[in-house]
Image (spheres, coloured by chain):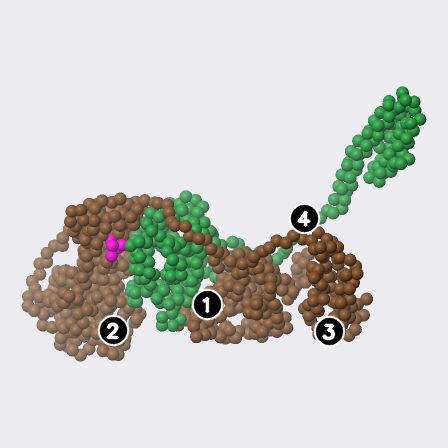
Chain colours: A green, B brown
């Protein structure tokens, strides 16, 4: 049986076809119920025993040839049909998605979070405390008696004779010890108030207070913890300096400086918790010791964002604060 | 305190490199604020901490340098002046606790002017040192007394003897006793004010300032020189009460060396003798040793010291440091405790921790070793901080910009807005615009809206989280979230249309509540006076109101001088922090069935009631009821609206058949008709 003419015709047909439908038609023409190859197979029985295997093999080869060729042709045709339809979907992706304002957190919130992130990772709990405080928690319990010159360092807003707007976050130290128990690791971010206003002072500002109390805490622990923190915050290996200072609620007390482009820059106050403060909070200073630190958020934000005028942080010009 | 480098070097007895000196002082705790380079000298500005009254003089600073350099300061030259005869004036101390020691002497035959009637001049170095210290020149006597104070730290005062009537008393004020001070300020003293007085009138507010009437002037020819020790407690807060802070009061408040008075008086006399002249009485000292400050023994354990500092100092090293600080020590051999006695000039050394700080200072804070913290385990718990931050991040993700306003606002604004309930006023506000604690976050946000729209913003979404304050019986602080949505954008983006409305806000609020794990809430028409009564809602959680949202009340707009409306919300923060126990349920494998039903509803009926009725009659397999169309007019009867619902059912056990669904639909239609006169539309 000579299949050559049929093969020639089949190859020609496949060459001419250009659509998925056309290919489907060819499939019917050759492999359908009455297709030419199907018919050949059906007629195999009419051949002699001897011719049959060879003819069968040729027919199968022809069928395979059609299926292979039409299969690859089909995927080519589909590919080009998809490409054609993609072209129709074409849009200008450079058109704007949204012309309106995007949201963001205030630079102060971001700075506080960066600080809390570090101390949280070291196991400190994040505490909160009242902003309207009693003189007791703000001063007396922190070893700052009435008329003590240290009170002059705080320009205090009063709401009545013995109630004030807290001048620092340190009252939370006592409150946290009273609320929880020692050993203890806490930090407390929050608003504080002092009657002072110029380029570097606003009557309300933010601080983060930190307190760690345990057995055998020493000054070296304080130095290490705060050095690690400053390196984390400024993302570099800073030159850090601890120098003696004075806070009534810590002894020894220190001021922490970092080396900046222009020289040493005061960054935070800290010290070992004063035994009187521990006693006042009901902790045995012979068994426990601890350190405390406090830092001004605006100052940290100022350095981090390289900005000058602190007051801008509270003017809430969206063009300014949305940059963070 | 400003001092000259040369003055300090004169006291120490050696030259110093200026930058090393500044560094040394700072590292000792005497922070050098600035160093000004002068023609032949340097002016060093030291920022003294309130505990170091002993450093409030050139001598005090020199003592610190000497201790750090391990040298001893040289002794002062003995005086070469003839003192003779008792002072004529008697001094009687009636308050020994406040004034344990009073030294004085009288100088007569004085003349502050020379033959040519010119005021006598003091040597240039005295004038220059005073000028650098920022102490104004008054007259040669006062200048010399100020110089003694600057040099060794003892505040002194001179009275014009001819202006004094009889004897002098040191006593507390009688009630309402008046005195005109040197600066001509007239003050009304109270019974806790220590006064120096003569037989007729007060002549000084002790340790703070003398009276105008008894002051030395250029015609003065005889004086009484006072060099006293007033206890810090008796002086503290007195100047401040009258708004006065003097060089004397600052030193007395912090503590003046109580063994310095006679020495200072001699020093002053020798300078007056040398540069002005006069005849001198003996120095008279009246004191009560039992009222003088005591220096209690402090027990120092070397092992405690080393534990607190992380050091391994020997007892010999520690004692050496303390000796240079003039802290005397004694301990028997093998005694674990060293007994220490601080010198009379130190008022800040009372307990072991104070001594540990001294040792740390002198070793150098920078030399103390760093050590990793090894603390006990502390259980983690999520606090309000994290919850607040999560919510802030969510709100910011909804295109809100966070703002932070002062907690105090103008009380007149709060009054205008009707926000005065429980308003707390500040007694000493920094200015009238910041004189009351906010009772709501609205005033601050309104200010932000005004200022930003003035700058041209026609679209603004801002929010704030913070405390609001009130006092009804007692003070309360509540954390709130609040925000403003202001949309006056005329030309929206190329694909946006329509302005922000109540339902845009409702969608946001529900998303927020969902984020806060608060699904079971009820909305009711708002009772807030800040909001438009017809376009606002209160949010209830288990019957408790937790916030409101909606369009701002037109009255508020008017009061705030705003022309264009905006949307506002305010929520209680703590109510938004909810833990949710979640159970994940496997979805049904059987198909969902949906029916779309439209109803003709009388205009006055609200959606929620219709929806509830549908839910009530929809059987156990109901998945959800969704409103997909609402319209009025068209072929509807008058005062009616059409509500179209897509209702979805699905069973967990079987495929639901049409008969079942049809029976439910009939039930829904029947009940709506019977109970609400609502008709199912064809």
| In this view, the mark in front (4 or 2) | 2
Q: Is residue A121 depicted above or below B87 in this figure?
A: above
Write down the chain letter for disc 4. A
Q: Label 2: which residue? A: B192
Q: Is residue B633 depicted above or below A52 in this figure?
A: below
Report x, y in % for residue B103. 14, 66
Query: What is the CA distance from the residue labelled 1 to the residue labelled 2?
Result: 37 Å
Q: Label 3: which residue? A: B675
Report x, y in % for residue A240. 37, 47
Secondary structure state at the residue bearing disc 4? loop
Marks 2 and 3: same chain? Answer: yes
Is residue B511 toward the left or the right of residue B404 in the image? right
Q: Residue furthest top?
A: A50
Q: Label 4: which residue? A: A93
Q: Nearer the viewer, residue B428 or B150?
A: B428
Q: Is residue A253 depicted above or below A36 in this figure?
A: below
Q: Residue at x 15, y 66 (%)?
A: B290
Label 4 with label 1: CB-CB less than 8 Å: no
Write down the chain letter for disc 2. B
Marks 4 and 2: same chain? Answer: no
Q: Earlier in the sequence, mark 1 or mark 2?
A: 2
Q: Earlier in the sequence, mark 2 or mark 3?
A: 2
| Residue B569 position by quadrant | bottom right
The N terminus of chain B - image quarter: bottom left
Secondary structure state at the residue bearing disc 3? helix
Q: Label 1: which residue? A: B477
| In this view, the mark in front (1 or 2) | 1
Q: Which residues are magenta?
A: B351-355
Query: What is the CA distance from the residue labelled 2 to the residue labelled 3?
Result: 82 Å
Marks 4 and 1: same chain? Answer: no
């Amino acid at each position: 049986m000579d299949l050559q003419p049929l093969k020639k015709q089949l190859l020609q047909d496949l060459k001419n076809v250009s659509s998925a439908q056309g290919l489907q038609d060819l499939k019917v023409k050759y492999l359908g119920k009455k297709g030419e190859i199907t018919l050949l197979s059906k007629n195999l029985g009419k051949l002699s025993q001897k011719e049959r295997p060879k003819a069968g093999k040729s027919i199968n080869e022809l069928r395979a040839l059609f299926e292979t060729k039409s299969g690859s042709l089909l995927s080519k045709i589909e590919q080009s049909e998809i490409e054609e339809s993609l072209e129709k979907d074409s849009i200008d992706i450079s058109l704007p998605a949204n012309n309106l304002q995007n949201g963001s957190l205030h630079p102060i919130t971001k700075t506080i979070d960066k600080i809390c992130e570090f101390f949280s990772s070291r196991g400190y709990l994040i505490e909160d405390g009242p902003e309207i405080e009693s003189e007791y928690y703000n001063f007396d319990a922190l070893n700052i008696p009435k008329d003590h010159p240290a009170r002059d360092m705080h320009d205090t807003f009063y709401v009545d004779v013995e109630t004030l707007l807290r001048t620092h976050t340190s009252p939370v130290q006592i409150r946290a010890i009273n609320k929880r128990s020692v050993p203890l690791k806490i930090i407390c971010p929050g608003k504080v108030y002092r009657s002072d206003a110029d380029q570097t002072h606003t009557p309300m500002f933010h601080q983060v207070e930190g307190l760690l109390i345990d057995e055998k805490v020493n000054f070296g622990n304080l130095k290490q913890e705060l050095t690690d923190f400053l390196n984390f915050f400024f993302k570099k290996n800073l030159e850090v300096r601890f120098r003696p200072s004075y806070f009534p609620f810590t002894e020894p007390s220190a001021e922490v400086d970092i080396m900046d482009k222009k020289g040493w820059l005061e960054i935070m106050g800290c010290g070992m918790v004063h035994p009187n403060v521990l006693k006042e909070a009901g902790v045995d200073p012979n068994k426990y010791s601890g350190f405390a630190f406090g830092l001004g958020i605006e100052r940290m934000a100022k350095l981090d964002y390289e900005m000058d005028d602190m007051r801008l942080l509270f003017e809430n010009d969206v063009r300014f604060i949305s940059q963070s | 305190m400003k001092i000259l480098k040369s003055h300090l070097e004169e006291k120490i007895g050696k030259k110093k490199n200026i930058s090393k000196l500044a560094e040394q002082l700072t590292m000792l705790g005497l922070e050098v604020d600035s160093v000004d380079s002068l023609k032949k000298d340097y002016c060093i500005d030291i920022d003294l901490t309130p505990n170091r009254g002993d450093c409030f003089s050139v001598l005090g600073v020199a003592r610190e340098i000497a201790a750090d350099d391990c040298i001893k300061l040289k002794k002062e030259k003995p005086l070469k002046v003839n003192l003779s005869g008792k002072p004529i004036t008697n001094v009687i101390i009636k308050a020994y606790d406040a004034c344990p020691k009073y030294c004085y002497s009288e100088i007569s035959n004085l003349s502050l002017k020379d033959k040519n009637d010119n005021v006598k001049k003091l040597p240039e170095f005295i004038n220059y040192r005073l000028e650098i210290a920022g102490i104004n020149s008054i007259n040669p006597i006062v200048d010399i007394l100020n110089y003694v104070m600057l040099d060794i730290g003892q505040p002194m005062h001179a009275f014009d003897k001819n202006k004094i009537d009889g004897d002098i008393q040191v006593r507390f004020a009688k009630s309402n006793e008046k005195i005109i001070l040197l600066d001509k300020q007239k003050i009304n003293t109270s019974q806790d004010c220590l006064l120096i007085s003569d037989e007729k009138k007060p002549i000084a507010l002790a340790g703070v300032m003398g009276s105008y009437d008894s002051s030395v002037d250029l015609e003065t020819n005889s004086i009484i020189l006072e060099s006293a020790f007033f206890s810090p407690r008796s002086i503290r807060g007195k100047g401040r009460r009258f708004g006065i802070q003097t060089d004397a009061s600052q030193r007395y408040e912090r503590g003046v060396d109580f063994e310095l008075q006679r020495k200072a008086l001699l020093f002053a006399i020798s300078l007056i003798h040398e540069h002005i002249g006069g005849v001198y009485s003996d120095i008279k000292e009246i004191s009560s040793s039992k009222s003088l400050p005591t220096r209690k023994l402090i027990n120092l354990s070397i092992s405690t010291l080393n534990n607190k500092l992380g050091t391994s100092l020997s007892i010999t090293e520690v004692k050496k440091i303390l000796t240079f600080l003039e802290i005397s020590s004694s301990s028997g051999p093998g005694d674990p405790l060293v007994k220490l006695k601080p010198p009379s000039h130190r008022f800040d050394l009372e307990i072991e921790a104070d001594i540990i700080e001294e040792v740390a200072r002198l070793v150098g804070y920078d030399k103390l070793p760093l050590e990793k913290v090894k603390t006990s385990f502390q259980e983690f718990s999520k606090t309000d901080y994290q919850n607040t931050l999560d919510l802030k991040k969510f709100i910011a993700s909804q295109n809100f910009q966070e703002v932070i306003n002062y907690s105090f606002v103008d009380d007149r604004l709060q009054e205008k807005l009707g926000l005065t309930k429980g308003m707390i006023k500040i007694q000493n506000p920094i200015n009238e615009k910041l004189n009351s604690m906010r009772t709501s976050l609205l005033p601050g946000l309104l200010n932000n809206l005004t200022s930003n729209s003035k700058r041209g913003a026609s679209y603004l979404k801002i929010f704030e989280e913070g405390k609001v304050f009130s006092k009804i019986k007692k003070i309360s602080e509540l954390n709130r979230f609040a925000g403003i949505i202001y949309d006056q954008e005329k030309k929206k983006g190329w694909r946006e249309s329509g302005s922000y409305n109540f339902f845009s806000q409702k969608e946001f609020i529900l998303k927020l509540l969902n984020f806060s794990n608060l699904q079971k809430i009820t909305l009711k028409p708002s009772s807030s006076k800040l909001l438009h009564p017809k376009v606002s809602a209160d949010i209830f959680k288990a019957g408790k109101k937790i916030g409101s949202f909606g369009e701002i009340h037109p009255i508020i707009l008017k009061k705030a001088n705003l022309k264009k409306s905006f949307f506002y919300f305010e929520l209680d923060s703590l109510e938004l922090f909810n833990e949710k126990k979640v159970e994940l349920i496997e979805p049904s494998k059987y198909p969902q069935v949906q029916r779309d039903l439209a109803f003709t509803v009388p205009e006055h009926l609200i959606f929620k009631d219709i929806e509830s009725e549908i839910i009530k009659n929809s059987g156990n397999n109901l998945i959800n009821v969704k409103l997909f169309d609402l319209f009025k007019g068209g072929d509807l009867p008058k005062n009616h609206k059409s509500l179209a619902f897509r209702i979805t059912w699905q069973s967990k056990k079987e495929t639901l058949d049409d008969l079942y669904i049809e029976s439910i639909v009939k039930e829904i239609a029947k009940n709506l008709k019977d109970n609400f006169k609502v008709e199912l539309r064809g």
